Image (cartoon, helix red, strand yellow):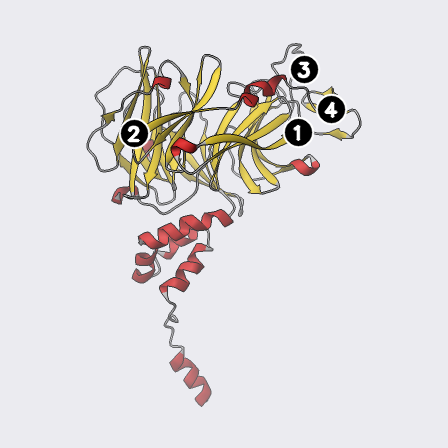
Amino acid sequence: MEKSEKRSSSGNGSMPYLSPEILSEIFCKLPIESVLCCRCVCKAWCYLTKSRTFIEQLLSSNVDKQPALILEQICAENDSTQPFLLVDIERRRVRQILIDPLKGLLAMGTCRGLLCLGSLSALDPVFVFNPITREYRRLPTSGEKKINSHLVGLGFEPSTRKYKVLRTYVKGRRRYFEVTTLGESSWRKLDVPDCSQAYLVYAPVFWNGAINWIAFKEGCDFIISFDVCHEKFRKILFPRDVYDFGIRPHAKDVGQSGPGVRRDNDGPLLAPPEGFVPHGYARLMTRIKPKELELLGFRGRLTIVEHDNELMRLWEVTGNKLEDLSICCWDEHDTHVLWNPYMTYKVIGWLSPECYLLEVSACYGTVRNRKMHFKMFLPEGAIYLPLDIPGLPPLFTTVRSYEPSLVSPETL
């Protein structure tokens, strides 16, 4: 009896003391949404998980976790809601994120868990948004009204701990660049670099202190890199091998045994991701359109993914300083699938060094019946594995290079 009384007196329901360092280690191993729930337990946990030190530690721990994905649902033309979807790959869960002021806007850039949202056809509004905490902040309004196209990128300056938003838009036949720092009340026009006239740009990626865009002009692809700290541009040219890649002979003589299916003459039949490619099209465009080069930032690496029929080649941007950057090839894979306009793929990231996460789009039955899904691609054995996640919409776009965080745009 005495022993039981001692137990109850020593265990009176109060929580055992754990140092902030130990709690931080524990929290960093949890799914980020669970960390968010921990803020409701007590004031001490709330204070800890909102501290700058913990937020940085949580960001660093993302390297060892399965990636979380942000999807934009592709809705009907008369539906402007376009809810964002947060996908937990490890637990196979989908959560809808729908906030009224953000309806109809697209995710254009991401950095340290924050998204930059805007419109392709208008300069306003632009928001910085954290889909985990659901906090958002509206950026200054611009005076420009009529534009042709608009893209926004987001970057972080470690020395000042400030976030900068870079946007580019076309008015008439001229391309403009503007920048603002979170907390400023206006946009500042930038001197236009020589390489930035009359060309196309695609989704930006923040890496190594710079916002990077793949650009295309007069049959030439290159990277425009914007140094966030010094607010300077640099043009990074691709090696000549990139341009010659499409005309190089393949390693093996390949015969087609069905729509989207490739058979090596000396090997077994290799099946593509499940999908139906319509028959009756004699002249299929065998290249992925509209872009054969993708820019992907993931786990500290800036990678260019190059597509050519069934081949996938990976280029890495290397170097520590903006003026010393270069591009070199670091890997090449045979996907064993004859990709075409009716069955395409995008590389989303890596689930492990041996496994790629792909977003696959395929037609089922008819050209109009297109559906999207995720596949795990293991190049070593030419294996495609399904990644079944209940609740995925038929059509969506994945926000690549996203990593979840608890950074609050409201306090920046």
Three-letter amino acid code of the residue under disc 2: Val
Three-letter amino acid code of the residue under disc 4: Lys
Which circle, 4 or 2, is nearer the viewer?
Answer: 4
Labelled pair 1, 4 in contact (Cβ < 8 Å): no
What residue would you read off at disc 4? 252
Q: Quadrant of the C terminus?
A: top left
Label 4: state its secondary structure. loop
Residue 31: image location, x then y, percent = 46, 51
Q: CA distance from mark 4 to mark 2?
A: 49 Å
Residue 62: image location, x then y, percent = 46, 48
Which circle, 4 or 3, is nearer the viewer?
Answer: 4
State which tag comes first along the sequence, 3 or 1.
3
Q: What label does residue 334 carry, if any?
A: 1
- Asked which quadrant contains residue 263, the reply is top right
Label 3: state its secondary structure. loop
Residue nearer the viewer, 356 or 134? 356
Residue 267: image location, x then y, percent = 78, 29
- Tell me if I can see residue 101 in this picture: no
Three-letter amino acid code of the residue under disc 3: His
Vertical relation: 278 (above or below) 22: above
State the residue lying farthest toward the front. 324
Label 1: state its secondary structure. strand
How packed mark 2 is, by other alpha carbons closer than 10 Å (few <14, some 14-19, many 20 or more), is: many
- Asked which quadrant contains residue 145, the reply is top left
What residue would you read off at disc 3? 279
Labelled pair 4, 2 in contact (Cβ < 8 Å): no
Three-letter amino acid code of the residue under disc 1: Asp
State which tag comes first along the sequence, 4 or 2.
2
How packed mark 1 is, by other alpha carbons closer than 10 Å (few <14, some 14-19, many 20 or more), is: some
